[in-house]
Image: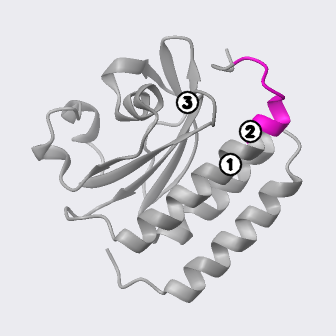
């Protein structure tokens, strides 16, 4: 995980939040997150996940190599699902050391550490994941920026859905 450029990361966050303030649909929110979060976090990959009943669907990604875009998993068997259910961020410095991680899903990927952020204010219905190819603690500054981005995306999500359909199913 590279040395953070705090000023540039904050500038990119401000730009993403400005774009989110004008988003008029879930598709626009997803596109903004996919296009901005990886650079803000200085991550090797980013995913955007949507709750679909008792499943989570990986609906967008920007990563070094393909991850899970287009795939769905049981909500309780997935870190993104746990972040949505528990409504708080999850940081995993080493995927092979955390019993919550379904390592078989990660083994063929570059992912060695990750952070997952729920999106949605009144019961999260989406999540954003950041992934790195090296194991280690998540940079606190990058984590704070991603948490801010996810919170603002949640505000935007609430505005565009107008409180309809908590799980977007």
Disc 3 versus disc 1: distance between alpha carbons?
A: 21 Å
Q: Marks 2 and 1: in contact by CB < 8 Å?
A: yes
Placement of 85 over or under 18, stated as above or below: above
Q: Marks 3 and 2: in contact by CB < 8 Å?
A: no
Q: How crowded is mark 3: few (under 14 residues within 10 Å), some or many (20 or more)?
A: few
Considering the image in quadrants, where does the C terminus appear? top right
Disc 2 versus disc 3: distance between alpha carbons?
A: 21 Å
User: Where residue 157 is drawn, which disc sits there?
Assistant: 2
Please identify, in this view, whether the residue under mark 3 or under mark 1 is nearer the observer. Answer: 1
Give the x, y percent position of residue 66: 45, 47
Horizontal placement of 128 versus 19: left or right?
A: left
- The magenta stretch spans which residues? 157-165
Report if residue 1 lies within the magenta region: no
Placement of 54 over or under 48, stated as above or below: above
Q: Quadrant of residue 82?
A: top left
Q: How many labels does the image show?
A: 3
User: Where residue 153 is drawn, which disc sits there?
Assistant: 1
Considering the image in quadrants, where does the N terminus appear? bottom left
User: Where residue 114 is drawn, which disc sits there?
Assistant: none
Residue 74 is at least partly visible in this image = no
- In the displayed orientation, state which residue is furthest to the front: 122
């Amino acid at each position: 995980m590279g040395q953070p450029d705090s000023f540039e990361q904050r500038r990119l966050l401000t730009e993403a939040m400005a774009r989110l303030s004008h988003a008029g649909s879930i598709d626009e929110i997803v596109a903004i997150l996919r296009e901005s979060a990886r650079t803000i976090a200085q991550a090797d990959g980013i995913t955007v996940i949507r709750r679909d009943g008792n499943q989570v669907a990986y609906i967008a990604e920007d990563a070094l190599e393909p991850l899970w875009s287009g795939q769905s998993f049981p909500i309780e068997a997935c870190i993104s699902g746990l972040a949505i259910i528990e409504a708080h961020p999850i940081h995993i410095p080493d995927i092979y050391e955390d019993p919550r991680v379904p390592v078989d899903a990660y083994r063929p990927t570059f992912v060695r550490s990750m952070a997952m952020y729920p999106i949605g204010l009144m019961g999260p219905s989406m999540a954003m994941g950041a992934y790195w190819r090296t194991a280690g603690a998540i940079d606190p500054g990058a984590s704070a920026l991603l948490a801010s981005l996810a919170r603002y995306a949640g505000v935007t999500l609430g505005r565009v859905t107008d409180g309809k359909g908590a799980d977007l199913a």
